[in-house]
Image: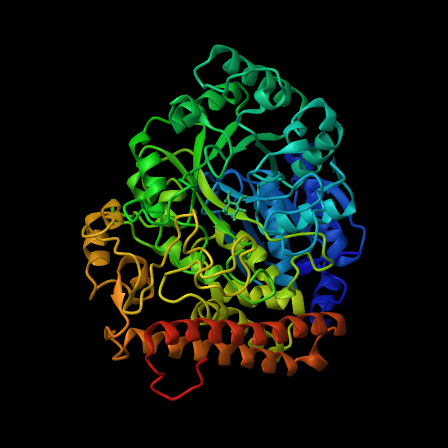
């Protein structure tokens, strides 16, 4: 079994029901759309929502019946290919240039109806901020999911690709939030996944691509850069080697000829053991461009990840700074990538910690297409057992002004606006699996929903996204809306406060990354050190230290380098600080650590209590499932608090000012 998440139409409110009954049972379709698959998905969606089979009437003459729906083609240039206008008067006109726009408009119309926000007259115009709104699945073909916290994969089982009813619901859910590109397999392409792009899996792949097409979703595949070596067909993966080039040319030709609606490749190269051009003394641009040339003739894209760093660092080496690696590898290549290459850059320079500065590549690269990659899968943010609504974090990143130009906030860089780039957008490592509720923690679906909504409209607020999510998923009861919205909106800062302090990150158990372990990564090879002694903690990343701060625009270099001016939440990311250092709040650093951890744990405790108030208002299974997660969070937050605080108490011998128990 699986649920419908925010598309559960089974219990409409009385008011929504009344509205539906007022709407004419005929939908008028502009003949221009008739051959488009998305138009049928739009109508089908309305049928699912209204519970009625509608009559389809083709024509451009307006029906003048009671409250009818008209799907109309218009050619307003400002709407682009995917934007829409909804006009409600004595009829509903959903207008767009393409059937994809109509599909998005229909989902929005249904959303407005379900939220009881419909008025007459009313006009809504919406154009996506980003052309690409993509998710990456880290699903393996054996059915497991790397960093998956919601059960196994629904795409793969037993080394086979599956397309079934659940995949259909998945496509609807994705389209309803505007996602238009999906990479279905893990970027760590190993074993059977090497063969996913071959004849062996073509049949279900075609089926999936067609299903996706009817929801305006392009299918992407993660590929192994050195696939021909894996297949035993070549011995070299040198991007300048003619045999290697021709192998990828042939492979790409075959794929594009056989797979409709194929978007292109997603590539993790020279990263965490994955092969890449570095082995042959070539650059990342050499590798990416080789593939770009192969897919170029078919309009294909290469999404090339920038998560490139040395994962074999000696912890005794204090000169090397992992945070600098991405910029060092890619910045010198700005302008050298082909136009159909898009660099996919993680939001921060490390790896999806609860708090990191924004990657210095954004804004600095002026002649390269860029995607912002965030992680909805909560690898380091509570693994969908703790509540951590990440939309406020993503919003903060989008609003970060890189200062490299006028209008050079991250949102404008990645949309392509600032530097007039052809391709750009946002990508989330997605948090879904085959659990009944899709995301393990029911409320983690807010990150899935929220990612799509924010990628569509980077100006929408995390508050309004949260409210809409709650209304659509849990109905319109004011207490439910108020309680869950508040839980969502405070959850990121709560999680941050009882886990790792002030941007330091990584105080987790190695490998699985769950639960506190302050020194878990301290003497390991991953380049993620806090270097805590009994007097100080943190890494000096100013020009007295690793000089990571030098990778930013001067405005930020100056700010981050100044201990007294550095944003407090990033203090320990940029500086090595004495525990007795007095923060602007008047607290010493050590007292700040104690206070935030105690407060955070209390906050988590209060989440459990707030949830209990909703017992009578929610469906019982959901209520209990979430209640159990909050119970775990409350206990686990206490563990985090005690482990972190005791660690620093033992290290420093400094007591808590308020006399709370330290171990
Ligand atoms: C898919 C982190 C994760 C890995 C992941 C990697 C990546 O290191 O722990 O599981 O691999 O990021 O983004 O490629």
Colour scheme in the image?
rainbow
544 lies left or right of 335: left
Q: Is residue 294 above or below residue 533?
A: above
Is residue 185 visible from the viewing direction of this image?
yes
Q: Quadrant of the N terminus?
A: bottom right
Depth order, front residue of 328/115: 328
Depth order, front residue of 381/480: 381
Residue at x 52%, y 24% (from the top left corner): 299
279 lies left or right of 117: left
Q: Position of residue 3 (x, y in %)?
A: 74, 58
Residue at x 68%, y 22% (from the top left corner): 258
> Hey, which quadrant is residue 58 in on the image?
top right
Q: How many marks?
A: 0
Q: Position of residue 425 (x, y in %)?
A: 46, 43
Is residue 461 visible from the viewing direction of this image?
no
Q: Is residue 303 above or below residue 383?
A: above
Q: Position of residue 571 (x, y in %)?
A: 29, 63
Q: Position of residue 50 (x, y in %)?
A: 75, 58
Considering every residue shown, the one lying at the far bottom of the view is 659
> Hey, which quadrant is residue 385 in on the image?
bottom right
Q: Is residue 164 above or below residue 290?
A: below
Residue at x 46%, y 44% (from the top left corner): 130
């Amino acid at each position: 079994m699986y649920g419908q998440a925010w598309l559960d139409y089974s219990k409409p409110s009385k008011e929504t029901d009344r509205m539906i009954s007022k709407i004419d049972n005929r939908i008028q379709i502009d003949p221009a759309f008739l051959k488009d698959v998305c138009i049928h998905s739009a109508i089908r969606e309305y049928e699912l929502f209204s519970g009625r089979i509608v009559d389809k009437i083709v024509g451009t003459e307006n029906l003048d019946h009671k409250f009818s729906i008209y799907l109309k083609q218009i050619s307003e240039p400002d709407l682009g290919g995917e934007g829409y206008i909804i006009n409600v008067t004595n009829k509903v006109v959903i207008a767009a240039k393409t059937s994809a726009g109509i599909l998005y408009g229909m989902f929005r119309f249904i959303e407005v109806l379900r939220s009881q926000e419909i008025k007459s007259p009313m006009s809504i115009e919406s154009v996506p901020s980003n052309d690409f709104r993509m998710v990456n699945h880290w699903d393996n073909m054996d059915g497991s999911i790397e960093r998956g916290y919601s059960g196994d994969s629904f795409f793969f089982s037993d080394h086979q690709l599956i397309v079934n009813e659940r995949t259909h619901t998945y496509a609807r859910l994705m389209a309803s939030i505007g996602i238009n590109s999906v990479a279905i397999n893990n970027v760590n392409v190993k074993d059977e996944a090497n063969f996913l792009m071959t004849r062996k899996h073509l049949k279900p792949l075609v089926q999936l691509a067609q299903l996706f097409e009817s929801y305006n979703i392009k299918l992407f595949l993660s590929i192994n850069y050195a696939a021909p070596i894996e297949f035993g067909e070549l011995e070299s993966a040198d991007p300048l080697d003619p045999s290697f080039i021709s192998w990828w040319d042939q492979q790409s030709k075959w794929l594009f000829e056989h797979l409709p609606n194929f978007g292109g490749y997603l590539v993790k190269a020279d990263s965490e053991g994955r092969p890449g051009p570095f082995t042959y003394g070539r650059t990342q641009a050499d590798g990416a461009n080789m593939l770009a040339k192969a897919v170029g003739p078919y309009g294909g894209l290469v999404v090339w990840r920038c998560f490139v760093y040395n994962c074999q660092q000696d912890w005794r080496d204090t000169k090397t700074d992992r945070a600098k690696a991405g910029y060092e590898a890619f910045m010198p290549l700005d302008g050298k990538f082909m136009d159909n290459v898009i660099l996919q850059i993680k939001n921060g320079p490390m790896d999806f910690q609860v708090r990191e500065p924004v990657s210095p590549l954004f804004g600095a690269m002026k002649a390269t297409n860029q995607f912002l990659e965030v992680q909805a899968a909560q690898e380091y943010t509570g693994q969908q057992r703790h509540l951590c609504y990440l939309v406020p974090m993503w919003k903060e990143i989008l609003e970060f002004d890189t200062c490299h130009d006028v209008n050079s906030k991250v949102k404008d860089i990645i949309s392509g606006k600032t530097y007039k780039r052809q391709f750009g957008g946002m990508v989330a490592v997605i948090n879904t699996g085959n659990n009944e509720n899709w995301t393990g923690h029911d409320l983690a679906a807010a990150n899935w929903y929220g990612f799509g909504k924010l990628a569509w409209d980077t100006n929408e607020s995390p508050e309004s996204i949260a409210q809409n999510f709650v209304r659509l998923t849990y109905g319109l009861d004011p207490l439910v809306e108020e309680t869950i919205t508040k839980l969502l909106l405070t959850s990121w800062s709560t999680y941050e406060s009882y886990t790792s302090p002030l941007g330091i990150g990584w105080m987790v158990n190695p490998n699985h990354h769950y639960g506190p372990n302050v020194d878990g990564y301290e003497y390991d090879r991953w380049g993620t050190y806090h270097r805590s002694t009994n007097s100080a903690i943190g890494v000096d990343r100013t020009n007295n230290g690793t000089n990571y701060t030098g990778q930013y625009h001067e405005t930020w270099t100056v700010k981050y380098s100044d201990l007294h001016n550095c944003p407090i939440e990033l203090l320990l990311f940029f500086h090595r600080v004495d525990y007795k250092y007095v923060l602007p709040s008047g607290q010493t650093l050590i007292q700040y650590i104690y206070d935030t951890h105690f407060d955070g744990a209390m906050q988590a405790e209060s989440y459990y209590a707030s949830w209990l108030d909703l017992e009578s208002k929610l469906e019982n299974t959901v209520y209990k499932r979430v209640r159990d997660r909050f119970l775990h969070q409350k206990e686990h937050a206490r563990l985090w608090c005690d482990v972190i605080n005791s660690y620093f108490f033992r290290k420093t011998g400094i007591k808590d000012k308020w006399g709370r128990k330290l171990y």
